[in-house]
Amino acid sequence: MVPHVVLSCLLAASPSAAQPPPPSAADAVAKAVEASELLQKALGFKLKPTGFVAGHVVFNTGSAAPSGDAPFFAAANSKTVYRAGARPWEGSGSLVITGRQSRFGVEAGFNINRWFDADAVLEFDLWALYLPNIPPGITAGTVRLRLAYAQVGTKYFKLLVGQALSVVAPRYPTSIGHLAVAAFTQAGFLWQRIPQVTALFNVPLAFAPPLFGAPRLFAAVSAARPLSGDHETAAVIVFDTQDPGSASLLPLLQARAGLDSTYLTLGVSGQLGAESYQLTNNTGAPRAKKLVETWLAAADAKFSLAGFTLQGQAFVGANVNGMFGMTGIRRSQSPIRNASGQVTGQALDDVRSLNAVGGWVQAMGPVWPGVAEWFVGAGVEHTVQVDLLADGTRLTNGALQAGLMFPVHKHLDAGLESYHVISRYRSSGNPIAWNDSLTAMMRVKL
């Protein structure tokens, strides 16, 4: 009798005889996702939510412009707290806590037949309300459309229609603080989410050995909605009203071609367009229209091996502020006077494109695989025709970046980033402005 009781107790206490724990909420979600994926695969259709909720804490020294959330140049005469005789609490600066760089969207796709499939992307963030005419003190974000495009085709050819990333901006620099506004904006990185019709070509090099990492030739040709930087505020016009780009009645042509593989990507790209400006006489009456060109030539590269990545891009162009570049046009004006000799306005005598050069480079690698990763980068943009710049105009803008990322989980990461901006102005006073930005970020991803 006693051995039987002892045996019963041992069986009850053994792991094999223990009751399995009840399924957790995470297990239930995982099984629901798995079932949904199997159903979508069987039906030839996919629907995937995308996005993340990101919280940022940003500490700036010096005047951060245009936004303390993610600065990309410093206001004229701005200085950091490190200047001689200054105490940290006496210097100009800001402390920003924000969640408006969060992002959400959906990706969809289905097979049309054995040769063709279709995909669509719809993506929003909360970065809106950053406009010159909003009431002061607004800290809440408003929904902004980032991406809205559909594409159809095969693995060799696709036709894309809608608002998508510009084909001349093939990759974005890694950043913790610049999730809504890309790092190195106006410091060597030209980019835009722009309405377009784009043909995408891919030619796999099947004869290449596997050692080369499945190389392919690619090309993209795009006819994009014409847009321009506003010639008075230097901000891209966001309303659906006529601007100098659309007034020209010509599309913005963009293209990129090159070689891509697992380890190496090489590309060249270009842009060509025109803007139409209404010139006026000394009474303010229209006298002629002038087409002003915008053009761009660029080269980019990316090299990845054993967890390390080196990437960058360089460009030369004219009137590129429609692509979030620093340099646009120079307006020549003269005063309009009434019969009494009083100045009542400004006549637009001439408009000229300003040439610029720039580029950026970034390196990334693991500190400890799966625990921490580092990234460092630098970028610069410079206006070539300094003699055409008005007094007080930025002529050079540079940025230095260093950061750490902590991939805690596939749905959770965090990071720290130091982003230092130096802006040089054409000015008889203090021509150099500084901004130091230190950002901490925590993000939950879908």
Image (cartoon, rainbow, N blue to C red):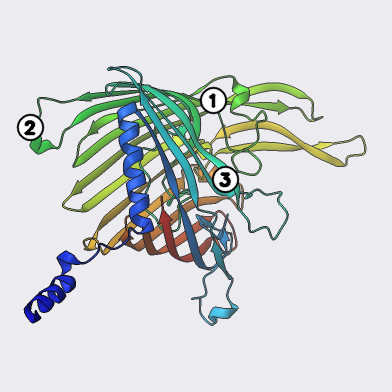
> Which mark is on residue 225?
none
Q: In front of the other: label 3 or label 1?
A: 1
Identify which residue is drawn at 32% across, 61% down: 22
Visible in this render: residue 411? no
The spot of residue 61 in percent (x, y) is: 52, 69
- Separation of residues labelled 2 and 1 (CA atoms): 44 Å
| Residue carrying label 3 | 389
Three-letter code, disc 3: Leu
| Residue carrying label 2 | 209
Disc 3 secondary structure class? loop
Relative vertical location of residue 225 with respect to residue 60 in this rendering, above or below: above
Disc 2 secondary structure class? loop
Three-letter code, disc 2: Pro
Disc 1 secondary structure class? strand
Q: Left or right: where does residue 10 sit relative to residue 296?
A: left
Q: For the residue carrying disc 3, how many other residues have a C-alpha within 10 Å: few (<14), some (14-19), or many (20+)? A: some
Q: For the residue carrying disc 1, how many other residues have a C-alpha within 10 Å: few (<14), some (14-19), or many (20+)? A: many
Three-letter code, disc 1: Ala
| Residue carrying label 1 | 274
Identify which residue is drawn at 52% across, 62% down: 432
Q: In front of the other: label 2 or label 1?
A: 2
- Separation of residues labelled 3 and 2 (CA atoms): 53 Å
**CB atoms of marks 2 and 1 within 8 Å:** no
